[in-house]
Amino acid sequence: PSRSDITYFGAGPALLPTDVLEEAAGALLNYNATGLGVAEHSHRSALAAGIINQAKADLASCLDIPDDYEILFMQGGGTGQFSTSVYNFAGAWVARKYKEIFGDVQGDPTDHPELLNQLKQAVDDELKIDYLVTGGWSQKASVEGERLLGSKHINIAADARKTNGGKFGIIPDESTWKLSENAALVYFCDNETVDGVEFPTFPKSLEPGPDGKGPIVVADMSSNILTRKIPVRNFSAIFFGAQKNLGMTGITVVVIKKSFLPPTISQPSPTLMRYLGLPVPPIIFQYETAAKNNSLYNTLSIFDVYVAGQVLKKLLRIYPNKVEGQQAVTDKKARLIYDAIEAFPEIYKIIPNKAVRSRMNICFRVTKGDDIDAAEKAFLEEATAQGLTGLKGHRSLGGIRASNYNSVPLEGAEKLATFIRGFATS
Ligand code: PLP
């Protein structure tokens, strides 16, 4: 088949807009008549800095990111951020505690064994990372947190499986969350790509109070960034790999409140971290390293930033009201697909609970007839024959998963909805 015959619903990486790819193909050979391709220019060139700065400005514009937030391009994917968020926010917690205990005391901390001991005690007793485990990705993040810090520093504030028969598919009621007093961070995954669970709105119990102060919230938005308006100010950091709704695989974006970076907070020295029994982050996984170097501490894939930038430009061109325009289309596409599935309760069963089902990853079973496996196989084969591909569910869960990322056009969602209805009645 050719590209135009296919509507692709794969969970990631996602399709990129064809016009962006066509232009990128030209840019790979000769960028802006420089004779060199965009991937061949030095990452230290003014041209590269221009591409980075423009992409940052356009992302900030799309998502209304305030000036007191920094945008970082990193590597290592969403998975890298499972580790990075732990290193940096645990470090920030220690830096704050240090200030609290040492006050204006200057010099080498080992010259003040009593204060140092007090700090060590505080770390041992109080340093916690809270995880809301609502699906496979937040679970993986919590496992990494525990691997890096040890279980005494990890608090599973909620685990959806506990009240849902051992399975994901719900978000536990906020009244049951057991949040820590002064967590280094509260972590959640805004959209669980595997399980099809999405937070409908920002959690009430994590909202800042009237004084603007609230918990330190870090969210994984790998699979739903740029699909709805987000209250950026409620977050200390948001991260996402580019490969679903922004661009190509290869860069990871971190939006972080500047007050977690120098000059406000610097990561504690490696000697101090070692003394406290805490891990020292690899240099490229320090947010402050990336921030001080405008994401260019080491060689960054400028091509990936360029592609992301072109996608952002396109979004801004199509939707004068920016991400809200995209959100209207996204919601409409999701509704079309869910409506088609829900019209046939005998034939299809949506996996997650209705109140928290994802607009991005629509997970369902085909229960037509006695043999689910055979029904799902037939569903996938017939869909593929019509150019509707990438619909097979995650290997751990089975079933069908239709991923409704930004590159799926409205007509694609309509085509899938029509197919779902047709399959049910055939
Ligand atoms: N978080 C979520 C929600 C994801 O969907 C994924 C990948 O699909 C990841 C994290 C892992 O991202 P990466 O493969 O970029 O490490």
Image (cartoon, grey):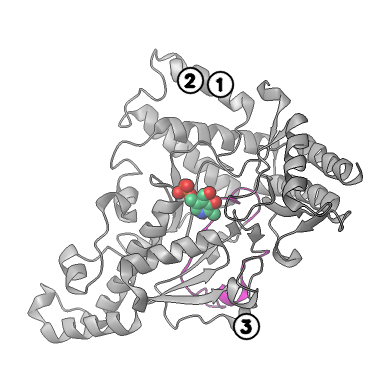
N-terminal label among 3 and 1: 1
Q: Nearer the viewer, residue 67 or 337?
A: 337
Residue 23, by quadrant, is: top right
Q: Whole-Å distance between the Cαs marked 2 and 3?
A: 52 Å
Q: For the residue marked with disc 1, what is the amino acid? A: Glu
Q: Is residue 66 above or below residue 385?
A: below
Q: Is residue 47 above or below residue 393?
A: above
Q: Nearer the viewer, mark 2 or mark 3?
A: 3
Secondary structure at badge 1 equals helix
Cβ–Cβ under 8 Å for marks 1 and 2: yes
Location of mark 1 (residue): 23
Q: Is residue 118 above or below residue 24?
A: below
Residue 77, numbered label: none
Left or right? Give the position of 167 relative to 104: right
Span colored in magenta: 200-229
* Camera sees residue 106: yes
Which quadrant would the C terminus be assigned to in this image?
A: top right
Location of mark 2 (residue): 27
Q: Is the CB–ligand 1 distance for label 1 below 8 Å?
A: no
Secondary structure at badge 3 equals helix
Q: Whole-Å distance between the Cαs marked 1 and 2?
A: 6 Å
Secondary structure at badge 2 equals helix
Q: Nearer the viewer, residue 263 or 424?
A: 424
Horizontal and vertical percent position of residue 28: 45, 20
Residue 276, by quadrant, is: bottom left
What residue do we see at 29% from left, 49% from top? 284
Residue 175, numbered label: 3
* Farthest front residue in view: 370
